[in-house]
Amino acid sequence: MSDSGRIDDFIRHLQYERRLSPETCKNYRRDLVALLTFREYANINSWRGLDSENFRAFSASCYRKGLSARSIQRRLSACRTFFRYLIREKHVDNNPITNVSAPKGKKRLPGNLDADRMARLLDIPGKGALVTRDRAILELLYSSGLRLSELTGLNCGDVDMCDAMVRVTGKGNKDRIVPVGRKAISALQQWDCARGELANVDESALFVSNRGTRISPRSVQARVSHWARRQGIDTNVYPHLFRHSFATHLLESSHDLRGVQELLGHANISTTQVYTHLDFQHLAQIYDQTHPRARKKD
């Protein structure tokens, strides 16, 4: 069978055995045709003849052609999957791309809302159990920097109103205690009074849907988006944006990276350090606008 025929067989495997979408199969084919072109250019006669150094050279050639790091990562991932298939079909003996890594892409900085827009978003109008619930959700997300899964996983006993603390279960099933701000405590107390109007009698979840059961992450996303539109926030607002804003604003005020790490529940401080880049970005902007030797002439 020809080398392109092996690719055809693999694409059929993706279509009919793994049930991948036509668009995904199209992307796999394009990436593997690029590998085949590279192989032929390098005078390598078979798939079995490729080794890890060849794949590093392939990655480098893609980079020189202007592909982004993300595109190269996807291309190498397609090649890994293809070679696993070739091993299964006994066309090759090993996967030479297993330990080949793609170039690292630029780290995307998380977005955040400035304090004024966050205050406008949190000042939601109206009365009733649903509005009271939504107000408590938004206030708690920003007050304590919770992940969406941590928020929806809360039970009634997890919030200590007297000590203004909340116990959350984060990644890796690790528990942590996080402070709750004054405004969030007030919103939670109002929700505690209204919760009985929505919650089923035996429901332990702190936040419930209008069906009386634990609220789903998708519902929280929808409500956050709804209130952002109602409050005239001209950017994409999602639950994790509250966490990013919480961390950024806290770090700008305190400059205590370790403290912010503990509050966010990050296992590694390098994860938290991304927020120092956000802070620096803000400072650099001020510098460019105000320093006599940095201001651009009109």
Image: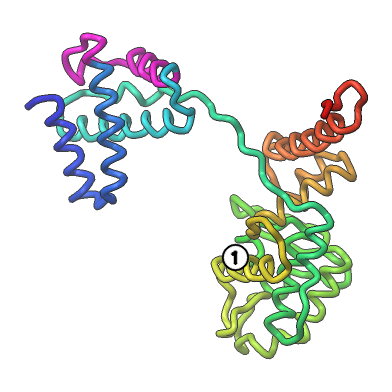
Tell me what residue is drawn at x 92 percent, y 24 percent.
292
Residue 155 point in image, percent of width and height: 67, 72
Position of 43 relative to 206 (above/below):
above
Any magenta on residue 43? yes
Horizontal side, residue 219 vs residue 183: left or right = left
Other residues around mark 1 within 10 Å, as few (<14) / some (14–19) / many (≥20): some
User: In the image shown, does 110 or 137 lie closer to the viewer?
Assistant: 110
User: In the image shown, does 157 or 55 lie closer to the viewer?
Assistant: 55
Task: State how many labels appear.
Answer: 1
Horizontal side, residue 12 vs residue 205: left or right = left
Magenta segment, which residues? 40-63
Tell me what residue is drawn at x 61 percent, y 51 percent.
171
Position of 153 relative to 281 (above/below):
below
Q: Quadrant of residue 224?
A: bottom right
Residue type at numbered disc 1: Gln
Tell me what residue is drawn at x 30 percent, y 15 percent.
51
Please, what secondary structure does the residue beneath circle 1 have? helix
Residue extending furthest right?
292
Q: Quadrant of the C terminus?
A: top right
Horizontal side, residue 244 vs residue 52: left or right = right
Position of 37 relative to 10 (above/below):
above
Residue extending furthest front?
298
Residue 190 point in image, percent of width and height: 80, 81
Position of 223 relative to 248 (above/below):
below
Residue 26 point in image, percent of width and height: 27, 41
Residue 228 point in image, percent of width and height: 68, 65
User: In the image shown, does 109 or 147 lie closer to the viewer?
Assistant: 109
Residue extending furthest left?
1
User: In the image shown, does 145 or 233 lie closer to the viewer?
Assistant: 233
Tell me what residue is drawn at x 35 percent, y 24 percent.
97
Q: Which residue is mark 1?
A: 221
